[in-house]
Image: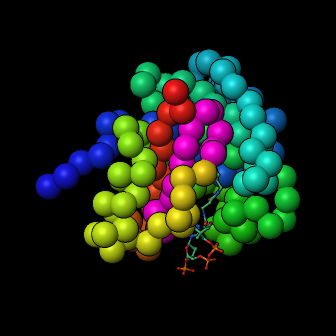
Amino acid sequence: MTTFFQKVEHIGIAVRDIHVANEHYSKLLGVPPYKSEEVVSEHVITSFFKVGETKIELLQATHEDSAIAKFIEKRGEGMHHIAYDVPDIVAAMQYFAEQGYTLLQQQPKRGADNKLICFIHPKNCHGVLTELCQEIS
Ligand code: CMX
């Protein structure tokens, strides 16, 4: 068996209103978000909270074509994806493609929080959208 995963880097949660969700999650986690960032290419505004080594990412759509807007329309607010930290995203993508997984990007793309990212289709992961992410050094 081969593993590329070093840790769960973050869990993404789709929210309708990031300001309201920031307040609720600050109260729940006992810390404020350490970062807020708009990812224009993904049509989202994000905020990040640290929980030990893992992070919680809140995502609000900025456009009706955003994957987050479609997700909320179909399924309501809630857990949107799990992201795993990988040391070499290109090698991981090649491996998963060879194993028959459906990659939603053919090349790594720039995501929030200084990461290169690629998604694996939820149908390959028992209904969970799965993200590979590598820190940009
Ligand atoms: N988790 C689990 N299942 C999901 C899902 C998610 N996040 N998003 C969609 N699905 C399900 C749908 O409910 C649907 O299920 P059924 O076939 O049972 O109805 C199935 O996947 C296919 O959905 P679809 O409506 O046909 O396809 P979409 O146009 O909604 O696309 C997906 C789904 C995952 C391919 C698309 O959302 C995508 O490419 N996502 C990757 C990019 C992304 O999510 N960006 C936002 C976050 C960016 C960031 O983290 O910075």
**Residue 32: which quarter of the image?**
top right
Which secondary structure type mostly characterizes the magenta part of the structure? strand
In this view, the residue farthest toward the top is 31
Q: Is residue 120 visible?
A: yes
- Residue 39 % position (x, y): 75, 44
Residue sitting at 60 percent across and 51 percent down? Answer: 109
Residue sitting at 40 percent across and 58 percent down? Answer: 93
Residue sitting at 31 percent across and 60 percent down? Answer: 95
Left of 25 or right of it: where is 65? right
- Is 117 inside the magenta-drawn segment? yes
- Which residues lie in the magenta part? 110-122
Ligand 1 positioned in quadrant: bottom right
- In the rendered picture of this protein, how many numbered marks are placed on residues? 0
- Is 76 inside the magenta-drawn segment? no
Residue sitting at 54 percent across and 53 percent down? Answer: 108
- Residue 2 % position (x, y): 19, 52
- Residue 15 % position (x, y): 71, 49
Q: In the figure, 79 relative to 85: above or below?
A: below
In this view, the residue farthest toward the left is 1
- Residue 110 % position (x, y): 63, 45
Quarter of the image with the N terminus in it? bottom left
Q: In the figure, 45 relative to 124: above or below?
A: above
Q: Is residue 21 visible?
A: no
Q: In the figure, 73 relative to 86: above or below?
A: below
Q: How is the image coloured?
A: rainbow
